[in-house]
Amino acid sequence: MLSVHGRKPAAVVIEPVAKTLNRLGVSPNAVTIIGAVITTAIVVTLIPAGHLVWAAVLTGLFAAFDMVDGTMARLRGGGTRFGATLDATCDRITDGATFAAITWWLIYSYDAHPSLVAASLVVLIGSQVISYVKARGEASGFAMVGGLIERPERLIIGLVGIGLHGFGVPYAVDVAIWVLAAGSVFTVVQRIAMAWNDPKAMDEAAAPAGTKDAAAHDHSWSVDTKEK
């Protein structure tokens, strides 16, 4: 939802930063990589160690790099296919690292109930599946716009949950994980429904380039695109 409705308000802060980096000659791809490396380092270091407030604040700050690189590319006249692929890959890495670190903390520091650990694993898996369904749907020509829990919502709810827990708010992380688990399952179903209801849903799938006999293929090929 926020990826659709939140871009214009965020642009007030993001665009000046993007313009400055462009003037300095920094490439959007460099910003993508730097943001992913720093964010991953923060979550896998601070969250398992129990420094939850700092983890939430710093992760939220450097996760904003995900908006900066895209804005930089747009201001330069448009991004490249490689840039989009790199960005999507880095997003999946940082998402996975964040919720893997939270799951680790739940098990080894929070002494979480097994059901909460299971819910956290649902969020971890769901973060990848939600993005993949969108990417695969768009590669098939479907309009996959929006969703209840996209990457911005996932990060905000998760980071607010661990941050509030760090401040001593009881069950804040529990509520955040359960909300994300339920919302992630809903969003996967929601995006499958988008594909099912698309007018092109029952069209025959196109064969990969260079394939002569489309009927002989198992249609297991895929193209990944960036989630927004």
Image (cartoon, rainbow, N blue to C red):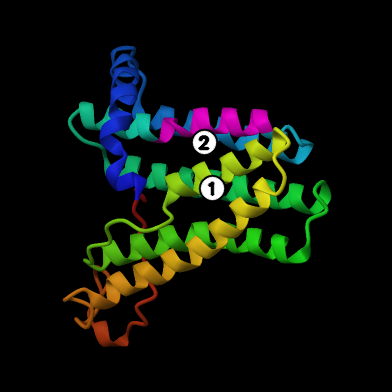
**Is residue 140 visible to the viewer in this orientation of the structure?**
yes
Residue 89, percent from left and from top: 45, 47
Answer with mark 1 or mark 2, whichever residue precedes in sequence.
2
Left/right of residue 131 with respect to residue 141 in the rendered view:
right
178 is higher (above) or lower (below) than 47: below
Q: Is residue 86 magenta?
A: no
Q: Which mark is residue 72?
A: none
Query: Residue most toward the front?
Result: 170
Residue shown at 32% from the left, 39% from the top: 6
Q: Amino acid at mark 2?
A: Ala
Q: Is residue 63 magenta?
A: yes
**Which of labels 1 and 2 is toward the front?**
1
Residue 107, percent from left and from top: 79, 54
Left/right of residue 84 with respect to residue 45 in the rendered view:
left
The magenta stretch spans which residues? 53-66
The residue carrying pointer 1 sits among few (fewer than 14), some (14 to 19) or many (20 or more) residues within 10 Å by Cα, namely many
Instruction: Indicate the secondary structure of the residue bearing disc 2.
Output: helix
140 is higher (above) or lower (below) than 40: below
Residue shown at 37% from the left, 82% from the top: 218
Q: Amino acid at mark 1?
A: Asp
Q: Which residue is mark 1?
A: 95
9 is higher (above) or lower (below) than 225: above
Q: Which residue is mark 2?
A: 36
Front-most of residues 15 and 83: 15
Residue 87, percent from left and from top: 40, 42
Residue 162 picture quarter: top right
Residue 149 picture quarter: bottom left
Residue 54, percent from left and from top: 66, 28
